Image (cartoon, rainbow, N blue to C red):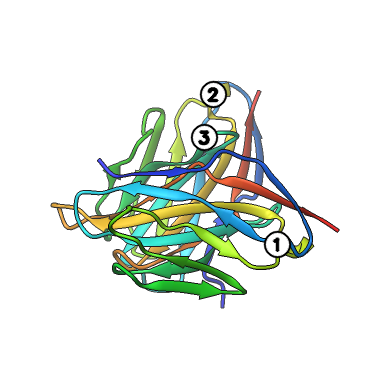
Protein backbone atom coordinates (compact mmCIF):
# COMPACT_ATOMS: atom_id res chain seq x y z
CA UNK A 1 0.00 0.00 0.00
CA UNK A 2 2.70 2.48 -1.06
CA UNK A 3 0.56 5.38 -2.36
CA UNK A 4 2.89 8.18 -3.46
CA UNK A 5 6.62 7.62 -3.08
CA UNK A 6 9.27 10.30 -3.51
CA UNK A 7 12.98 9.77 -3.92
CA UNK A 8 15.31 10.94 -2.60
CA UNK A 9 14.14 12.15 0.82
CA UNK A 10 17.10 14.48 1.36
CA UNK A 11 19.65 16.01 -0.96
CA UNK A 12 22.33 18.68 -0.81
CA UNK A 13 23.41 20.25 -4.10
CA UNK A 14 26.01 22.78 -5.02
CA UNK A 15 24.94 25.82 -7.02
CA UNK A 16 24.86 24.95 -10.70
CA UNK A 17 24.47 21.20 -10.26
CA UNK A 18 21.53 19.35 -11.72
CA UNK A 19 19.30 16.67 -10.27
CA UNK A 20 16.04 14.84 -10.80
CA UNK A 21 13.40 14.12 -8.20
CA UNK A 22 11.28 11.06 -8.81
CA UNK A 23 7.65 10.64 -7.85
CA UNK A 24 5.88 7.31 -8.24
CA UNK A 25 2.23 6.49 -7.52
CA UNK A 26 0.51 3.14 -7.57
CA UNK A 27 -3.12 4.33 -7.49
CA UNK A 28 -3.59 4.70 -11.24
CA UNK A 29 -4.25 8.42 -10.83
CA UNK A 30 -4.40 10.58 -13.92
CA UNK A 31 -3.30 13.82 -12.26
CA UNK A 32 0.10 14.41 -10.68
CA UNK A 33 1.60 17.57 -9.18
CA UNK A 34 4.83 19.00 -7.89
CA UNK A 35 4.69 21.60 -5.11
CA UNK A 36 7.30 23.41 -3.11
CA UNK A 37 6.80 24.40 0.49
CA UNK A 38 8.60 27.37 1.96
CA UNK A 39 8.13 29.06 5.37
CA UNK A 40 5.35 31.62 5.23
CA UNK A 41 4.54 30.81 1.60
CA UNK A 42 2.41 27.72 1.97
CA UNK A 43 2.37 25.28 -0.92
CA UNK A 44 3.08 26.59 -4.39
CA UNK A 45 2.42 24.59 -7.52
CA UNK A 46 5.47 24.16 -9.77
CA UNK A 47 4.18 21.93 -12.59
CA UNK A 48 1.42 19.43 -12.98
CA UNK A 49 0.26 16.73 -15.37
CA UNK A 50 -3.25 15.62 -16.29
CA UNK A 51 -2.16 12.41 -17.95
CA UNK A 52 0.69 10.42 -19.42
CA UNK A 53 2.70 12.49 -21.85
CA UNK A 54 1.21 15.82 -20.73
CA UNK A 55 2.64 18.56 -18.51
CA UNK A 56 1.62 22.10 -17.66
CA UNK A 57 3.10 25.04 -15.78
CA UNK A 58 1.93 25.96 -12.34
CA UNK A 59 2.50 29.04 -10.28
CA UNK A 60 6.31 28.92 -9.99
CA UNK A 61 7.70 26.91 -12.94
CA UNK A 62 10.92 28.83 -13.66
CA UNK A 63 14.09 26.81 -13.17
CA UNK A 64 12.27 23.47 -13.24
CA UNK A 65 11.33 20.96 -15.90
CA UNK A 66 9.09 17.91 -15.67
CA UNK A 67 8.31 14.77 -17.61
CA UNK A 68 5.49 12.23 -17.45
CA UNK A 69 6.60 9.42 -19.73
CA UNK A 70 4.71 6.81 -17.73
CA UNK A 71 1.40 7.28 -16.00
CA UNK A 72 2.77 6.24 -12.63
CA UNK A 73 5.86 8.46 -12.65
CA UNK A 74 6.33 12.21 -12.59
CA UNK A 75 9.88 13.56 -12.66
CA UNK A 76 10.97 17.03 -11.55
CA UNK A 77 14.30 18.26 -12.88
CA UNK A 78 16.53 21.11 -11.82
CA UNK A 79 18.96 21.88 -14.63
CA UNK A 80 21.14 24.37 -12.76
CA UNK A 81 20.33 24.54 -9.07
CA UNK A 82 20.22 27.89 -7.28
CA UNK A 83 20.07 28.67 -3.54
CA UNK A 84 16.53 30.02 -4.10
CA UNK A 85 15.48 26.46 -4.89
CA UNK A 86 16.26 25.34 -1.36
CA UNK A 87 12.89 24.03 -0.23
CA UNK A 88 10.81 21.01 0.63
CA UNK A 89 9.29 19.47 -2.47
CA UNK A 90 6.06 17.50 -2.42
CA UNK A 91 4.58 15.34 -5.09
CA UNK A 92 0.87 14.54 -5.14
CA UNK A 93 -1.58 12.63 -7.29
CA UNK A 94 -5.34 12.71 -7.67
CA UNK A 95 -8.33 11.72 -9.73
CA UNK A 96 -9.42 15.08 -11.17
CA UNK A 97 -11.13 17.24 -8.54
CA UNK A 98 -11.11 14.68 -5.77
CA UNK A 99 -8.62 14.81 -2.93
CA UNK A 100 -4.91 14.60 -3.61
CA UNK A 101 -2.54 12.11 -2.02
CA UNK A 102 0.87 13.38 -1.05
CA UNK A 103 4.31 11.90 -0.80
CA UNK A 104 6.52 12.36 2.26
CA UNK A 105 8.52 15.17 0.71
CA UNK A 106 12.09 15.78 -0.43
CA UNK A 107 14.19 18.26 1.51
CA UNK A 108 16.59 19.94 -0.91
CA UNK A 109 19.37 22.29 0.14
CA UNK A 110 21.36 24.19 -2.47
CA UNK A 111 24.62 25.65 -1.18
CA UNK B 1 -8.09 33.04 -10.57
CA UNK B 2 -8.87 30.86 -7.60
CA UNK B 3 -7.50 31.70 -4.18
CA UNK B 4 -7.71 30.56 -0.58
CA UNK B 5 -7.17 32.82 2.41
CA UNK B 6 -6.49 31.46 5.85
CA UNK B 7 -6.27 33.32 9.11
CA UNK B 8 -2.81 34.32 10.26
CA UNK B 9 -0.97 32.09 12.68
CA UNK B 10 0.52 30.52 14.65
CA UNK B 11 -2.18 29.47 17.06
CA UNK B 12 -1.42 28.15 20.53
CA UNK B 13 -4.14 26.56 22.64
CA UNK B 14 -4.40 24.62 25.84
CA UNK B 15 -5.59 21.04 25.72
CA UNK B 16 -9.41 20.72 25.59
CA UNK B 17 -9.84 24.25 24.24
CA UNK B 18 -12.18 25.01 21.35
CA UNK B 19 -10.55 25.51 17.97
CA UNK B 20 -11.65 27.61 15.00
CA UNK B 21 -9.44 28.17 11.97
CA UNK B 22 -10.93 30.51 9.41
CA UNK B 23 -10.77 29.88 5.68
CA UNK B 24 -12.37 31.85 2.86
CA UNK B 25 -12.06 31.27 -0.84
CA UNK B 26 -12.49 32.86 -4.23
CA UNK B 27 -13.53 30.71 -7.15
CA UNK B 28 -15.36 31.26 -10.40
CA UNK B 29 -17.43 28.08 -10.30
CA UNK B 30 -18.35 25.40 -7.79
CA UNK B 31 -15.21 24.10 -6.15
CA UNK B 32 -14.67 21.19 -3.82
CA UNK B 33 -13.17 22.28 -0.51
CA UNK B 34 -10.64 20.46 1.64
CA UNK B 35 -8.72 20.66 4.87
CA UNK B 36 -5.33 18.99 4.92
CA UNK B 37 -3.13 18.39 7.95
CA UNK B 38 0.66 18.10 8.03
CA UNK B 39 2.24 16.53 11.09
CA UNK B 40 5.91 17.34 11.77
CA UNK B 41 8.25 15.78 9.23
CA UNK B 42 5.45 14.32 7.14
CA UNK B 43 3.56 15.03 3.96
CA UNK B 44 0.03 16.39 3.82
CA UNK B 45 -2.92 14.16 4.56
CA UNK B 46 -6.55 14.82 3.83
CA UNK B 47 -8.44 15.67 7.01
CA UNK B 48 -11.91 16.31 5.60
CA UNK B 49 -13.68 17.55 2.52
CA UNK B 50 -16.97 18.93 1.19
CA UNK B 51 -18.02 18.90 -2.42
CA UNK B 52 -21.11 21.13 -2.51
CA UNK B 53 -22.77 23.96 -0.66
CA UNK B 54 -24.04 23.18 2.85
CA UNK B 55 -22.10 19.91 2.99
CA UNK B 56 -20.36 19.27 6.28
CA UNK B 57 -17.09 17.38 6.30
CA UNK B 58 -15.97 15.70 9.51
CA UNK B 59 -13.14 13.51 10.73
CA UNK B 60 -11.29 12.91 14.01
CA UNK B 61 -13.56 15.37 15.82
CA UNK B 62 -12.91 18.15 13.29
CA UNK B 63 -15.75 19.67 11.27
CA UNK B 64 -16.12 22.22 8.50
CA UNK B 65 -19.22 23.36 6.62
CA UNK B 66 -19.19 24.56 3.00
CA UNK B 67 -20.83 28.00 3.11
CA UNK B 68 -21.38 29.32 -0.40
CA UNK B 69 -23.06 32.52 0.75
CA UNK B 70 -20.00 33.57 2.75
CA UNK B 71 -17.46 31.63 0.60
CA UNK B 72 -16.07 30.07 3.75
CA UNK B 73 -14.98 26.67 5.03
CA UNK B 74 -13.95 27.23 8.65
CA UNK B 75 -12.41 24.34 10.57
CA UNK B 76 -13.64 23.64 14.10
CA UNK B 77 -12.98 21.18 16.88
CA UNK B 78 -14.67 21.20 20.25
CA UNK B 79 -11.76 19.94 22.35
CA UNK B 80 -8.22 19.87 20.97
CA UNK B 81 -5.54 17.43 22.07
CA UNK B 82 -1.77 17.69 22.12
CA UNK B 83 -1.72 15.22 19.23
CA UNK B 84 -3.59 17.78 17.06
CA UNK B 85 -0.46 19.95 16.94
CA UNK B 86 0.28 20.28 13.23
CA UNK B 87 0.03 22.60 10.25
CA UNK B 88 -3.45 22.91 8.73
CA UNK B 89 -4.08 23.84 5.11
CA UNK B 90 -7.34 24.86 3.53
CA UNK B 91 -7.60 24.06 -0.18
CA UNK B 92 -9.98 24.11 -3.09
CA UNK B 93 -10.20 22.20 -6.31
CA UNK B 94 -12.11 23.31 -9.34
CA UNK B 95 -12.30 21.99 -12.84
CA UNK B 96 -11.22 24.85 -15.04
CA UNK B 97 -12.34 25.63 -18.55
CA UNK B 98 -9.61 23.35 -19.86
CA UNK B 99 -11.00 20.43 -17.85
CA UNK B 100 -7.92 20.50 -15.65
CA UNK B 101 -8.32 20.19 -11.95
CA UNK B 102 -5.79 21.88 -9.73
CA UNK B 103 -5.57 22.19 -6.00
CA UNK B 104 -5.13 25.71 -4.69
CA UNK B 105 -3.84 25.94 -1.13
CA UNK B 106 -3.93 28.54 1.58
CA UNK B 107 -0.67 29.40 3.31
CA UNK B 108 -1.30 27.05 6.20
CA UNK B 109 -1.49 27.72 9.90
CA UNK B 110 0.54 26.12 12.65
CA UNK B 111 -1.42 24.87 15.65
CA UNK B 112 0.37 24.09 18.89
CA UNK B 113 -1.58 22.50 21.73
CA UNK B 114 0.01 22.56 25.16
CA UNK B 115 -0.86 20.08 27.92
Secondary structure beneath label 3: loop
- Find disc 1 in the rendering and name its residue: B84
The reply to whether residue A96 is visible in this rendering is yes
Q: Mark 3 to mark 1: distance in Å?
A: 22 Å
Vertical arrangement, residue B62 with respect to residue B111, above or below: below
> Does B17 sit left or right of B106 as displayed?
right
Q: Nearer the viewer, mark 2 or mark 3?
A: 3
Mark 2 vs mark 3, CA separation in Å: 13 Å
Q: Nearest the camera: B93 or B43?
A: B93
- Give residue B80's quadrant in the image: bottom right
Per the model, the C-alpha gap separating discs 1 and 2 is 32 Å
Q: Residue furthest bottom?
A: A1
Chain of the residue under label 3: A
Nearer the observer, B23 or B70: B70
User: What residue is pinned by disc 2?
Assistant: A84
Q: Mark 2 and 3 residues: CB-CB less than 8 Å, in contact? A: no
Q: Nearer the viewer, mark 3 or mark 1?
A: 1
- Earlier in the chain: of badge 2 and badge 3, it is 3
Amino acid sequence: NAGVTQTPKFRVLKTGQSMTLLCAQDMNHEYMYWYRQDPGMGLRLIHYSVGEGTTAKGEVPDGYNVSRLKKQNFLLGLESAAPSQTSVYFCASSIRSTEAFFGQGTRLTVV
Amino acid sequence: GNSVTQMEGPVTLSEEAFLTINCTYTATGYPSLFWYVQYPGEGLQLLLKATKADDKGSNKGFEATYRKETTSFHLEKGSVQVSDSAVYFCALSEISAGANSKLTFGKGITLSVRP
